[in-house]
Image (cartoon, rainbow, N blue to C red):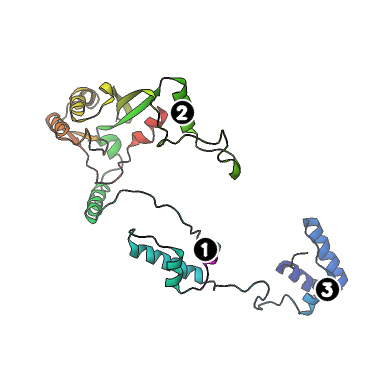
Amino acid sequence: MAPHMTPEELDCAIQMQHDGVGVVKIHERLSAKRVKKGVAATDLTSVRKALKGKTFKRGRKETRGRKRALKPTAAKKINTVRKKLIKDAKGMREVHWKDILKAARVTVISTTASRYLKEAGLEVKWQKPREKPLRQPEHEQERMEVCGRWRRYPSNYFTDTADLIMDNKLFRIPTFERARQYAKMQKVRGHLRLRSEGLEPGFTKPSSKKHMMNFGGSALVCAGLINCRVKLWHYLPKGRWNGEVGAATYRGPIYRALKHYRGEKAEYKVIEDNDPSGYKCKVAVAAKKELGIKAVQFPRYSPDLNPLDYSLWDEA
């Protein structure tokens, strides 16, 4: 069955009729244009009815096809109700389609409502909640205060004013063939495959939670950036990081690197990982106070955005 006449074809046909072209000739020209595009040509009767005004009336209400179950504005209303119910639930209970449709007073099934939202550019579907740190109002206020203070710092504060940016990284070292194969499989991010090929050999990888493997070796590295260059690279003993090891590292390689590359100063500004273990315990805090090392404080339950996480460690 040939497709309906488009508005452009109807305009062209009306113009040709106005110029005195016959209906048969108009049909031939429209058919020739469709043949060039690989589209089935419409029949002569349809062209004649359109030119007489019996069909394709401009501004007329659409009567073809199934009657729409919802008004065009219904999708916006359903989405507004959805967000309101989820906000009222405060993450303590599930909000289902039946709750949304009942509150919106819409008499359609969930599939119809979902289709209308998708047509409006809102692809709402059931998904697992993503996990993130649970911040209370006092944590939000602390974050606002810190950000309000930091926004007044010069643009070169973290590159010139900060004396050291440091972080720790544990590298697992595979020492046998099976561990090396496991490590390579974990790095695979995706495949070009069919949906039905998802569980076939070669398209899967082992779960890092259910199929953990002992690689046989590891190395814990403490690295630091000074003047935007890696000037600190220290292997921690026995791959451990705690208060005693942290204090010894501050008194040893960290303090030596600061004195060598930043000179003698009464106070060194250091940006360290937001992890409390080894950095914020009493022994490490006492060692930093003794050496004149002051760590930049981050708001609680906030990412530290350490440059080493997305530059040095990836390269290593």
Q: Amino acid at mark 3?
A: Thr
User: In the rendered structure, which disc, 2 or 3, sits on the residue that comes first in sequence?
Assistant: 3
Image disc number at residue 45? 3
Residue tagged 2: 182
Q: Which x, y percent locates residue 39?
A: 77, 59
Name the residue nearer the viewer: 173 or 94. 94
Q: Secondary structure at mark 1?
A: helix
**Which residue is denoted by mark 1 in the rendering?**
114
CA gap, disc 1 and disc 3 = 39 Å
Quadrant showing the C terminus: top left
Left or right position of 288 against 191: left
Q: Amino acid at mark 1?
A: Ser
Question: Tag 3 or tag 1, which sits nearer the N-term?
Answer: 3
The residue drawn where x is 47% and y is 32% is 187
Task: Tell whether position 159 is magenta.
Answer: no
Q: Label 2 neighbourhood size at 10 Å, few (<14), some (14-19), many (20+)?
A: some
Q: Quadrant of the N terminus?
A: bottom right
Q: Would residue 109 be counted in the magenta stretch?
A: yes
Q: Earlier in the sequence, mark 2 or mark 1?
A: 1
Mark 1 or 3, closer to the camera:
1
In the image, residue 172 sits, relative to residue 107, either above or below, namely above
Residue displayed at 29% across by 51% down:
134
Tell me which segment is drawn in magenta: 106-116
**Kind of residue at disc 2:** Tyr
Would residue 192 be found to the left or right of residue 177 on screen?
A: right
CA separation, marks 2 and 1? Answer: 41 Å
User: In the rendering, at what x and y percent does residue 221 appear?
Assistant: 31, 26
Do callouts 2 and 1 mark residues in contact (Cβ within 8 Å)? no
